[in-house]
Image (cartoon, grey):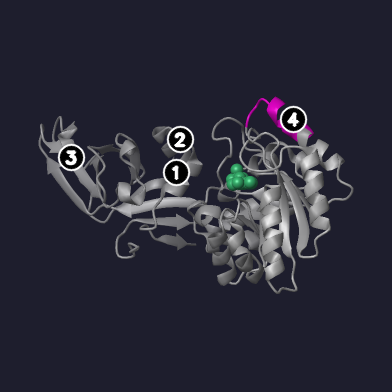
Amino acid sequence: MAVGWHRPTKLVIDTQAIKENVGNEVKRMPQGTELFAVVKANGYGHGAVQTAKAAIEGGATGFCVAILDEAIELREAGFTEPILILSVVDVSYIDLLLKYNLSVTVATQEWLEQAIEQLNHIETQTPLKIHIKVDTGMGRIGFTTPEAVKQTVELVQSTQTLDWEGVFTHFSTADEKDISYFEKQTHRFQAVLSVLVELPRYVHVSNSATALWHPDNVGNMIRFGIAMYGLNPSGRALPETYPLKPALSLVSKLIHVKELSAAEGIGYGNTYTTTENEWIGTVPIGYADGWLRHLQGFSVLVNGERCEIVGRICMDQCMIRLPKQTAVGTQVTLIGQDHGEEITMQMVADKLETIHYEVACTFSERMPREYK
Ligand SMILES: *Cc1c(COP(=O)(O)O)cnc(C)c1O
C-alpha cells in the first residue's frame, strides 16, 4: 500500500511515553515478574517494531503477538527476546516456529498430537516451545478442565521434541468494577494449577487490566497491551491506578480554506448547509485512513479551538467549520493536545460507540507513523 509520506496527515507516536508506561508497570510489579509487551496488530496501530523497541527500553523482556507473521516481523527486525503467539497456529507451520525460535499457544490435545507427528518428521535439535492455554471463562480457546490440562502436560513431558514453557489463561472482566466473574476465573485457574505436579517457567494470567486492578494476581509474567500505549483498559469504567501517558497523536494541516455565504451545501448528500457566512476548511483525511464517516459532527482542534466536522466525511478528505479565516497549512489536531486543549482516543471511541482499542487498530497503513 502506498503510504502518504507526501501528505500532511500523520500519526505521531511518542515512544518515550511507551517506555514510561512500561517502566511504571515494571517498577510496581511483584519481584520475579516479567513484562511481555503485547505488540499484536502492528502494535495496536502504533507500529510493532518501534513500539517493541520502546518497550524493551522500558524494561519489557519479551513479546506477545496474535499471529505468526507478527512474530516473524519482530525476528526479522532483529529482536531476540522470547515471543509468544497468543492464538492458534496451523501445525503445518511448525518449521517456521522452530526456525524463528517462537513460542506457541496450545489449546487442544488434537493440535498437540498433530504437532508431535510433524515434529517427528523434522530433523531438529531444538524442541518446540509451548504455552498451554486454559479457558477459564473467556470461551475463546483453551482447555476447559484440570484433567484435560493434566493429561496434556503428561503428553508434553513424555515428548523430547516439546519444551513446556508456560501455562496461562485470560480474563474477560478484569476491567470491571464487579469482580465476581474475575474471581470465578481465578478459582478455575487455581484448580488447574493444583493438579499439576510441577509448573513451567511462565505462569501468566495478566492483561493490562489485571495488572492495574488485580496486582496480586499477575502470575510471574504480565501480558501488557493497551496500557503500554497509555490507554485505560476499562475505558471510563475504572480510574487509572497510576497515570498512563497516551502515545498516539493524529495531526494534519488545512489544505484549503474558503468563506461561504449562507445556504451553501457541504459534502456528499449535502447533509450540512451553512446558516451564515462561514469559514470552511478542508482536511486531507478520510475514512480510507480510518477516520470514519460516523465522526461527522465530532470536533478537531485548530489553534486550540474546537472545530466541528461538517458534512459527510469523504474517503480522503473532510471539512471543518473554522471560527475565522485561517491560513492554509495551519495544523489540525485530530487526536492529541493543542494549546492546552485535548482530544483523546477515548473521545473518538465514545463518538464511534466503540472502544479505543478498535479506534487504534482502524487507522490505516496509508497514514505514516512518525516516531519521536
Ligand atoms: C490482546 C491480549 C492481551 C493484551 O490485552 P490488553 O487488554 O491490551 O492488555 C493479553 N492476553 C491475551 C491473550 C490477549 O489476546
Q: Is mark 3 within 8 Å of ligand 1?
A: no
Q: Which residue is mark 3?
A: 268
Instruction: For marks 4 and 1, give the CA distance.
Output: 30 Å
In the image, which residues are magenta?
176-187
Viewer-proximal residue among 47 and 182: 182
Q: Is residue 75 above or below residue 253?
A: below
Q: Nearer the viewer, mark 3 or mark 4?
A: 4
Percent of width and height locating residue 90 = 58, 57
Neighbours of disc 3 within 10 Å: few (<14), some (14-19), many (20+): few
Q: Identify the amino acid type marked 3.
A: Tyr
Quadrant containing the N terminus in the rendered view: bottom left
Q: Residue at x 12, y 40 (%)?
A: 260
> Which of the two discs, 2 and 1, labels the residue nearer the N terminus?
2
- Residue in the image at 83% along x and 42% along y: 193
Identify the residue under disc 2. 354
Q: Is residue 82 visible?
A: no
Secondary structure of the residue carrying numbered label 3: helix
The residue indicated by pointer 4 is 183
Dividing the picture into quadrants, the one containing residue 81 is: bottom right
Mark found first going from the N terminus, 3 or 2: 3
From the viewer's perspective, tell me whether residue 318 is left or right of residue 295: left
The amino acid on which the numbered mark 1 sits, given as a three-letter code, is Val
The image quadrant that residue 278 belongs to is top left
Residue 359's disc number? 1
Label 2 CA crowd tier, 10 Å (few <14, some 14–19, many 20+): some
Q: Nearer the viewer, residue 156 or 120?
A: 120
Cα gap from disc 2 to disc 4, whole angstroms: 26 Å
